[in-house]
Image (cartoon, rainbow, N blue to C red):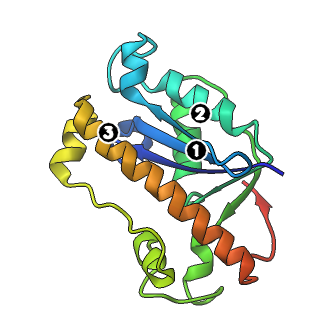
Amino acid sequence: MRVAYFDLETHDLKPEFGPIICASVLDSGSGEMKTFRMDSYRRRKKAKDFNDDRALAVDLRDYLETFHVTAGWFSKGFDLSHLRSRLVYHGERPLKEMLHVDANWYFRGWRGLKPMSSKLKHVSQFFGFEEKPDVKPEVWMAAKQGNKVALDEVCERCEADVRITAAITEKAFDLGLIKNINRY
């Protein structure tokens, strides 16, 4: 069974104002990380500017749909709905409903464990996993405008978030916290 661990980084938390800056997907089977970056879409003239995430969103959707299961961190609350909303905003078909795991919900105390908080940073610290990188606000602003160095930093954070999510999700399975997988 192929699992895709994924994460999005966006301009804003509201889909109408939040084009996707980058998205990373880790293939659990091969260990390959694939990152979709707005600057590569601009360079290949698949986007008219850094707000035009149509092709990126379609490519991400199509890639995710090649997996049996998707998994993310607070992905039920953000990543899935944001991607679907961006696709529909562009007149495209949304990501189909798939089996999905969001381990975030098992670290809120009432469903499993209760570290300092259910934020990815704190759960990663709780287990001694990779540290979640911080990105300064001015780097985010530069990345949204297409600055390559800033975008590199944001993409590195996105990839780290995916690796951390994979480690925590696998740990949650090992601990027996995740008892079922639903469709979202």
State the residue lying farthest toward the left: 138
Question: Which type of secondary structure does the marked residue at label 3 adopt?
Answer: helix
Which of the two marks, 2 or 3, is nearer to us in this view? 3
Q: Earlier in the sequence, mark 2 or mark 3?
A: 2
Q: Which mark is residue 154?
A: none
Left or right of 2, for residue 63: left
Q: Earlier in the sequence, mark 2 or mark 1?
A: 1
Question: What amino acid is labelled 3 in the image?
Answer: Asp
The structure residue drawn at horizontal position 69% and vertical position 52%, both measured from the top left corner, is 28
Measure the C-alpha gap from mark 2 to mark 3. Answer: 19 Å
Determine whether label 2 and label 1 are within 8 Å by CB.
yes
Asked where in the image residue 104 lies, by quadrant, the reply is bottom right
Please state which of residues 65 and 81 is positioned toward the viewer in this rendering.
Answer: 65
* Up-down relation of residue 111 to residue 164 (above or below): below
Q: Which residue is mark 1?
A: 25
Measure the C-alpha gap from mark 2 to mark 1. Answer: 9 Å
Pointer 2: residues within 10 angstroms few (<14), some, or many (20+)?
Answer: many
Q: Which residue is mark 3?
A: 152
Q: Is residue 13 visible?
A: no
Question: Which type of secondary structure does the marked residue at label 1 adopt?
Answer: strand
The structure residue drawn at horizontal position 19% and vertical position 37%, both measured from the top left corner, is 142
Instruction: Say which quadrant the C terminus sits in.
Output: bottom right
* Up-down relation of residue 12 to residue 165 (above or below): above
Pointer 3: residues within 10 angstroms few (<14), some, or many (20+)?
Answer: some
Q: Which mark is residue 60?
A: 2
